[in-house]
Amino acid sequence: MPTYKLCYFDLRGLGEMGRLIFAEAGVDYTDERIKKEDWPARKPGMPFGKMPVLFVDDVPIAHSRAMVRYLGRTFNLMGSNELEAAQIDMWIEVLFEAVMEYPFSEQDETKKTQAEKKETAWTDHFFPKFTKLNEQIAKSCGPYILGEKVSVADIVVCAMIELLKTLYDASKFESFGLISKLTDTVAARPNIAAWLKKRPQD
């Protein structure tokens, strides 16, 4: 088995998806947490100057989605066939679009000022996006997105909801009962529950 090292800041953020996947798979890895003050010196050593970066036997895999997909394929968490893998890909893309592309990536300063008003962002963006996601989960046979078998899509849902809960009160998510049930189910899986209990506190 190759050696793994996950490089990210000393916080959960986008690195937590990889940590949760390693936990679920029960695979050892080096969780290298880089202090913000050390980042300028470390940045040139990262392929595209960003993190997270997963090193597999010293071969870097940059960007969260590429890392998630690689780990999913490696640890048998990308479904049982190509169609299921495509569905998982769909969920990964939709989740990143929902959570990361707005308001955080807005470049226009006028729009960004408005986007960063959390209530406006919730009403205009997050609420409708997660309403759709909740509706799609309702179509699955449960308890996971693809039915009986957990996948990286479920783990990404759990990580993304946790990320948003650092910005919004948990009561905001009460309207999305199926999403909440899914995240609770993922968090209760033995290996993941053990990680959640012992992981560093942000």
Image (spheres, rainbow, N blue to C red):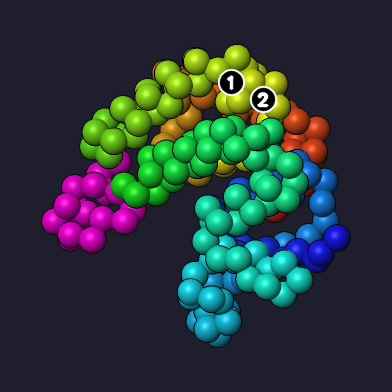
Task: Say which residue label 1 marks.
Answer: 181
* Residue at numbered disc 2: 185
User: Dot 2 surroundings within 10 Å: few (below 14), some, or many (20 or more)?
Assistant: some
Which quadrant would residue 130 be assigned to in this image?
top left
Does the stretch in magenta take in 36?
Answer: no
Do we see residue 20 in this rendering? no
Q: Residue at x 45, y 21 (%)?
A: 136
Q: Quadrant of the N terminus?
A: bottom right
Left/right of residue 113 with respect to residue 195 in the rendered view: left
The kind of residue tagged 1 is: Lys
Q: Nearer the viewer, residue 113 or 150?
A: 150
Front-most of 53 and 121? 53
Q: Position of residue 190 (x, y in %)?
A: 80, 33
Residue 96 is drawn in which quadrant?
A: top left
**Label 1 with label 2: CB-CB less than 8 Å:** yes
Label 1: element kind: helix
Q: Magenta residues?
A: 103-118
- Is 112 within the magenta? yes
In-front residue for pair 162/201: 162
Instruction: Identify the image quadrant of residue 171.
Output: top left
Query: Is the residue 180 above or below the residue 48 in the image?
Result: above
